[in-house]
Image (cartoon, rainbow, N blue to C red):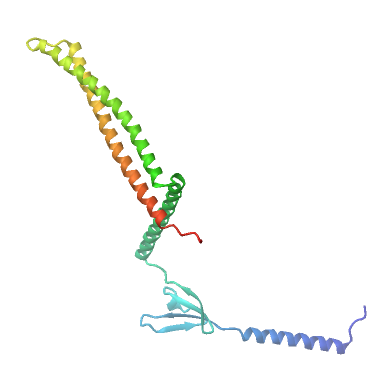
Amino acid sequence: MPLPDAKCLRRLLACAAMLAAGAASAQQGGPKVTYCCNDDNGVQVCSDQLPQICYKRAYRVLEGTTVVKRVEAPLSPEQRRQRQIEERRAAEEDRAIREQRRRDRILLDTYNSVQDIEAQRAKAIREIEQGMYQAQQELAELQKKRLALGEESEFYKRKPMPPELQAAIRANEADIAAQQSIIDSKKKDIDAVHARFDEDKRRYLHLVRNAPKSPE
């Protein structure tokens, strides 16, 4: 391949120089970056590098006259603590919202009407009442037995009661207390069921009444 002559080389060098000069000019013509903050007196301090006075303050980064970035001041320990509290509170509120939405979806998937809610309430109450009825029947039998044991113990007012009779009375009293505890627990269960279904009904009606209407 023939080498370019001197005249051609001079032209190439001149073009390269023009391109370099154009690039430098373009760089110099770009927007100037400036860092600004306010001092203790509210006076704005700016420089092409971050001024030392701005190190522990909020500052702004400008390109020309346009603010392209804002940097917050470093937080004090108390400010960090408050921010952590706020972040935890926000996270808890977000979890509560997501949990309520999940429960709402389940509620709407479970019931098609208020009548469905009342039917499920009645079913749950019946199941508890069946268990309570059994406990009441057993309690009645234990109370009859307690009367019989009491009558038997009348024979031992003036002499020591046999250990077997004493043990039978103690066992009977413990059984009566246990059955009564079961009955009391069942009554609380019924109250809890009513409270749960009352809340389901209240929430269901709220969701249905506030559901977005489908376009006609």
Q: Residue at x 18, y 12 (%)?
A: 165
Horizontal side of residue 213 vs 31, given as left or right: left
Work out which quarter of the rendered image holds the N terminus and state it: bottom right
**Residue at the front extreme, as displayed:** 216
Q: Residue at x 25, y 30 (%)?
A: 181
Q: Residue at x 47, y 79 (%)?
A: 51
Q: Is residue 156 above or below residue 59?
A: above
Horizontal side of residue 146 vs 54, given as left or right: left
Residue 139, by quadrant, is: top left
Of 175 and 164, which appears nearest the observer?
A: 175
- State the image coordinates of residue 162 (x, y, percent, origin top left): 16, 10
Q: Residue at x 58, y 83 (%)?
A: 31
Q: Is residue 63 above or below residue 151?
A: below
- State the image coordinates of residue 49 (x, y, percent, origin top left): 51, 79
Of 115 and 79, which appears nearest the observer?
A: 115
Q: Is residue 161 above or below residue 37?
A: above
- State the image coordinates of residue 132 (x, y, percent, origin top left): 29, 29
Of 148 and 214, which appears nearest the observer?
A: 214
